[in-house]
Amino acid sequence: MAATIQTAPVDDVNAPPGRAACLAALQARFGERFTVNETIREQHANTLTWQGNQPPDAVVFPETTEEVVEIVRLCAAHHVPMIPYGTGTSLEGHVNAPFGGVCIDTGRMKAVIAVHAEDLDVVVEPGVTRKELNEYLRDAGLFFPIDPGADASIGGMAATRCSGTNAVRYGTMRENVLALEVVLPDGRVIHTGSRAKKSAAGYDLTHLFVGSEGTLGVITKITLRLHGIPEAISAGCCPFPSVHAACDATIQTIQSGIPVARIELLDVASVRSVNAYSKIGLPETPMLLVEFHGTDASVQEQAARFGEIAEGLGGGPFEWATRAEDRTRLWQARHDAYWAGRAANPGMLTFATDVCVPISHLADCVEETARDLDSIGIAGGTVGHVGDGNFHTQPFFDVNDAAQRAAIEGFLARLAARALAYGGTCTGEHGIGQGKMKFMAAEHGEDALGVMRAIKQAIDPENLMNPGKILPPRQDPALRVEA
């Protein structure tokens, strides 16, 4: 990892000339919407991993696509790196600035541009958060289903190809983004895709940028699929005698065609910490939290069929939470699992890491991962969007203990290798960022990485757009960061 370029005030005579000129021009243009304040810069390199905070040289807050274009053209002219930023909820060092540069915070671009209720789609600016969007849509009887837990921005969700608890029924951002407006690294603006539900016209540029983590451009508009708010929603919790039984219940539920909307795993450690943090009173055994969407009759049928599957595997009873406030409390407790784990392990460093495997291998992969943590003497909890084979492990360790750090490094490498051996991926939804670059060659092979590098080179030949992310750092020595 390259060292962070130390940031200096705009008028510092020791600042590199190209960068100083760029920052001075941005300050003159954007005034109070430009800052080199140290605290704000550090906030914009926030990370929930063990990666160090690597702040940008400055942060600028555009309010229109045209202003993003101005920023990008100024940075490109002075060879200054750019780091697109949404709400900073990504987990693998996506918003760090290892080469310094300018953070482009799109949080003030909050317009809901058009709702096409009859076509079930909406056009929004990148700073709109998922909760803000659903509040806006509620009166129209519509909702956007992607729910990563944090109140992430739509632009950031598209850039990281995020997922969440509803993915088993509604898919991920990949399936729910129809079109994009993107400012390229040289300031050109392109529009990808359309509002049509399908197209066979040329390369699929929309989904090239979905998941590109800000390395190919700045997303400034997003067209999303919407869904009607279900007539009936029912959620509940179901205890199991073991994690394996809970995973088997998940597999049988999916394979039997029950259209479950959410099905989430919590192991015993996670249930205990969630109970203590959220005061929710779940039985302290492995647990599935499930939710069904549909008509009153279909929801009852789905829940009954799930209950039969659970009972056959020694699980149950399945306890319903039919009131909206009870469902909200249940899912908020699940979303707070990370913070619950931290509260249960004071003084310890933690982070959440994820992998995804075919669901037929889910139970084995989860159990082998738990045994791996036990074998190295590291405490941890596991939760997961197990309906699509995606689970998250949260180890706790002393950051100042070199032996524990080394043990965690080994564990992460084995976890990724285990997922790949089962035909899975090193990350189902967190993305690569800085943290998982080391696993890219094993997952994709050098030839595929070569294609990715060729795409990056073609679109961003100066390597200025969020450099040091996704692709392993073979190209970093040639990075041009100064005039």
Image (spheres, rainbow, N blue to C red):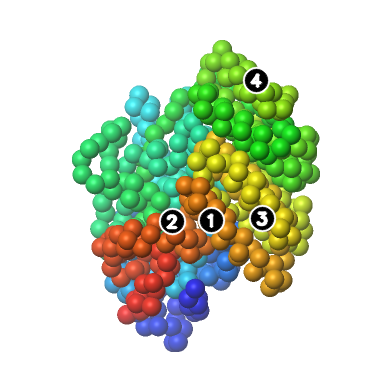
Of labels 3 and 2, earlier in sequence is 3
Q: Which residue lies under the disc numbered 1?
A: 416
Give the secondary structure at mark 2.
helix
Task: Tell me the SS state at disc 4.
Answer: helix
In this figure, which residue is indicated by the disc labeled 2?
A: 443
Say if mark 2 contacts mark 1, CB within 8 Å. yes
Lower sequence index among marks 3 and 1: 3
Q: Residue 285: x percent and y percent?
A: 75, 37
For residue 308, the mark is 4
Q: Furthest-left residue in view?
A: 201
- Closer to the camera, 40 or 230? 230
Q: Earlier in the sequence, mark 1 or mark 4?
A: 4
Q: Is residue 309 above or below residue 54?
A: above
Q: Earlier in the sequence, mark 2 or mark 1?
A: 1
Say which residue appears at 73% left-offset and 24% top-offset: 317
Q: Is residue 377 visible?
A: yes
Q: Secondary structure at mark 3?
A: helix
**Disc 3: which residue:** 372
